[in-house]
Image: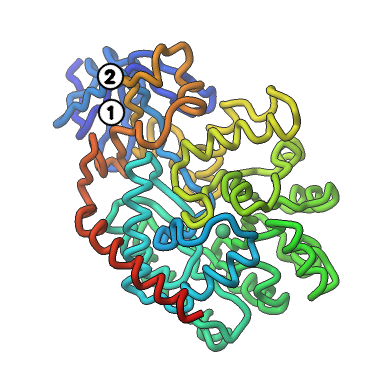
């Protein structure tokens, strides 16, 4: 039989397919046509069945799905390292908010470009964001060739960004309309948190999410001080407020859930809401440890996120996977907690569901070709017994040698095909002076 034509074949020593059987293929290849995966299998079979315009042989390598970041604020790369070693509320009110209230569209775009470049080079192909001027994040994502869910954040009105609720709702409608034809970009309704908004505003925003059929995401129960603040203001805990106002729904995405009771975990599970786990940000801000094992055992669908680069301080999902796996083991004094496969699921297939991109997160025929490759020809990845183990416990984002999204090569052996990283680097240096001036004016 004549081989079928395709655009690209990627070959490597192993494929972590993340398909339904979590199949591992030794000596495998993926055939790609346009934006889709045409076939996944053993190299010899793929090469006899398919003929490609381009074959990328990655040598000693692991091919796997692009990683999915379930919680971040990409433009916050601009604030990476500006303020460390502070508690959440101090950090937010005395450092992040003063800088953020002076942000311009250009700066947000620059921050998003830095973040997209970092994620592409580190093997992340999709993320869900929450920030201001998300149209600029969308512009960067579109040019970068990644996938994203954009969330235009809002706080109590008036805020530095929206004087009235109507202003915010109009902007959300505009953002959604702007990207409605773009299959790689979706939008989400994004109130910042219970303690920085008010319940009626949250309820109104949920009506908009229902009407527009969008995800509704919020920071929830991130730390004990947040719970205390919410209790003092509203007389109830964050997740209690969400339940009381009917905000726990299937479309709800909760970020953090560190300070949650067993009863609250039950409510989240019954509602079908999903939770993003952000272990490094929780550790760095001293917010505590999310009872992730309990959430998963309760049947809650969980994704994995880095949170913003100012509280992490990178957007490396490999780093995050390793921390997620280790943290629960130490927390529960149980090395069997959070096995590598569970962590990889959170960062791939489950992350895809978290973002509402159902056609990514696994390497299967018919899925989108969102693929990354780890270069295993490195000393810290030798020898290889189990590629899954290396992906979670030994590899880092810097080991990624190829990133493909929707069938397009975005990054290969240190070179970006869509982003001008030299210009981005130069502009990033200039942004430092701007941020420091903002802090002087506090
Ligand atoms: Zn966050």
Q: Which element carries disc 2, helix, strand or loop? A: helix
Residue that mark 1 sits on: 31
Label 2 or label 1, whichever comes before in sequence order: 1
Task: Please determine whether, in this image, residue 356 is positioned above or below residue 67.
Answer: below
Residue that mark 2 sits on: 46
Q: Is residue 379 left or right of residue 313?
A: left
Q: Residues within 10 Å of mark 1 (few under 14, many from 20)?
A: many
Q: Nearer the viewer, residue 416 or 357?
A: 416
Ligand 1 placement by image quarter: bottom right
Contact between marks 2 and 1 (CB within 8 A): the answer is yes
Residue extending furthest toward the front: 440
Name the spot of residue 324 as percent of width and height, x first: 60, 37
Q: Which element carries disc 1, helix, strand or loop? A: strand
Q: At 58% across and 55% down in the image, what residue appears?
A: 85
Q: Is residue 126 left or right of residue 212?
A: left
Where is residue 184, by image quadrant?
bottom left
Regarding residue 186, the answer to whether it shows in the image is: no
């Amino acid at each position: 039989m004549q081989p079928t034509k395709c655009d690209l074949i990627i070959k490597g020593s192993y494929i972590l397919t993340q398909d339904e059987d979590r199949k591992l293929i030794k000596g495998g290849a993926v055939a790609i046509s346009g934006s889709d995966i045409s076939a996944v299998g053993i190299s010899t079979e793929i090469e006899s069945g398919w003929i490609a315009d381009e074959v990328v042989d990655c040598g000693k390598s692991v091919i796997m799905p692009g990683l999915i970041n379930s919680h971040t604020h990409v433009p916050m790369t601009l604030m990476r390292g500006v303020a460390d070693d502070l508690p959440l509320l101090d950090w937010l009110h005395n450092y992040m908010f003063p800088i953020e209230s002076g942000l311009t569209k250009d700066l947000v775009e620059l921050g998003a470009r830095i973040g997209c470049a970092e994620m592409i080079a580190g093997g992340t192909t999709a993320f869900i964001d929450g920030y201001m001027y998300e149209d600029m994040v969308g512009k960067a994502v579109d040019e970068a060739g990644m996938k994203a869910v954009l969330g235009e954040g809002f706080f109590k009105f008036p805020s530095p960004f929206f004087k009235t609720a109507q202003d915010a709702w109009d902007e959300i409608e505009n953002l959604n309309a702007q990207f409605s034809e773009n299959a790689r970009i979706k939008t989400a309704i994004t109130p910042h948190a219970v303690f920085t908004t008010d319940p009626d505003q949250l309820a109104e925003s949920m009506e908009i999410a229902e009407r527009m059929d969008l995800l509704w995401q919020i920071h929830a129960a991130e730390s004990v001080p947040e719970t205390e603040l919410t209790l003092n203001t509203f007389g109830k805990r964050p997740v209690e407020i969400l339940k009381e106002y009917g905000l726990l729904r299937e479309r709800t995405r909760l970020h953090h859930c560190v300070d949650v009771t067993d009863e609250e975990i039950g409510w989240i599970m019954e509602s079908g809401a999903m939770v993003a786990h952000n272990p490094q940000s929780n550790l760095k801000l001293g917010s505590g440890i999310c009872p992730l094992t309990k959430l998963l055992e309760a049947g809650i669908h969980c994704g994995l996120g880095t949170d913003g680069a100012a509280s992490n301080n990178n957007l490396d999902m490999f780093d995050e996977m390793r921390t997620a796996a280790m943290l629960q083991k130490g927390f529960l004094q149980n090395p069997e907690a959070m096995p590598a496969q569970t962590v990889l699921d959170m960062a791939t297939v489950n992350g895809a569901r978290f973002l509402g991109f159902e056609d990514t997160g696994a390497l299967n025929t018919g899925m989108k070709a969102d693929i990354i490759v780890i270069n295993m020809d490195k000393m810290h990845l030798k020898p290889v017994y189990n590629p899954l183990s290396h992906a979670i416990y030994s590899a880092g984002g810097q080991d990624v040698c190829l990133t493909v999204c929707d069938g397009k090569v975005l990054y290969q052996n240190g070179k970006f095909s869509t982003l001008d990283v030299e210009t981005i680097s130069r502009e990033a240096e200039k942004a430092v002076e701007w941020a420091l001036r903002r802090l002087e004016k506090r």
